[in-house]
Image (spheres, grey):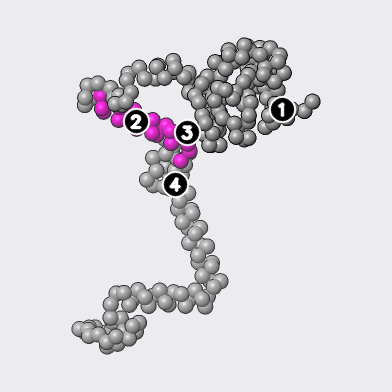
Amino acid sequence: MTCEECGAGFRTTWRGRPDRKPKFCSGECRRLAAARRSREWRASHPEEYAAKYEAELERRRKATLDRAAARSCPYCGGPMPPRRRKYCGALKCKGAYHRERNREWMRKYKAEHGVPYVARYRGPDHVEKLNALTGSRSDDPARKQERWQRRRAQKLATTVEKFRHEDVYERDGWICGLCREPVDRELRYPNPKSPSLDHVIPLSRGGHHVLENVQLAHLTCNVKKQARIAEEEPA
């Protein structure tokens, strides 16, 4: 017999109905022939194929929604379409899921070893020491501003020193380096007269984030100066 797909001859021991005789020499040729017939049908019946394709998409979409309606997120109650999902995908639910996993791992570790887990590079009072030195990383706006300015300086590939804004303010005697007027230490951002850190030579002009290149300034004075140097200030 001759394969209808590749044309190679093959032998068979078929003893059934004549109209059911094998037409292909292997399963691979059978799959290739089916794919070829499918391509030919799609090319000759484009509208019918498009309708069947849309119907299949709608069927799958409906099945997904049905599965979502049957399951709800254990953290927010929203739908969870994928079958293997543990949460709906929202960021807050993702955080809750991983916190729960972490707490469960901590409980198992303590039950197995008798003591709570502490990373090798941290001591039991690591958080307290860190907050005492740098302030809380989430609640102190001044510390956030310091980290943001250091990060900005690093992106501009300048020299970066780590210092506290209060040290610069005390060094300058709470006098604005631009208008030479006193700065009220009780005011806070976004008050126009609140204290801010000004770079004498702006970072965008090649200045460095070092103590010698920073000074105290009113927020409004700092904003008006923009990226100019003192010698370029308008009269």
Given residues 16 and 180, the one toward you in this image is 180
Q: Earlier in the sequence, mark 4 or mark 2?
A: 4
Residue 17: name its quadrant.
bottom left
Q: Is residue 18 visible?
A: no
Residue 231 image label: 1
Given residues 75 and 193, the one toward you in this image is 193
| Amino acid beneath label 4 | Pro
Real-space Cα distance between discs 1 and 3? 50 Å
Q: Nearer the viewer, mark 2 or mark 1?
A: 1
Using a 10 Å C-alpha cutoff, classify the residue at mark 2 as few (fewer than 14 neighbours), some (14 to 19) or many (20 or more).
Answer: few
- Region in magenta: 89-110
The reply to whether discs 2 and 1 touch (Cβ–Cβ < 8 Å) is no
Residue 177 position in % (x across, y down):
67, 19
Q: Is residue 114 magenta?
A: no
Quarter of the figure with the C terminus: top right
Residue position marked by numbered label 3 in the rendering: 92
Residue position marked by numbered label 2 in the rendering: 102
Q: Earlier in the sequence, mark 3 or mark 4?
A: 4
SS at badge 1: helix
Q: Earlier in the sequence, mark 1 or mark 3?
A: 3
Residue 161 position in % (x across, y down):
50, 26
Using a 10 Å C-alpha cutoff, classify the residue at mark 4 as few (fewer than 14 neighbours), some (14 to 19) or many (20 or more).
Answer: many
Real-space Cα distance between discs 3 and 4? 18 Å
Q: Nearer the viewer, mark 1 or mark 3?
A: 1
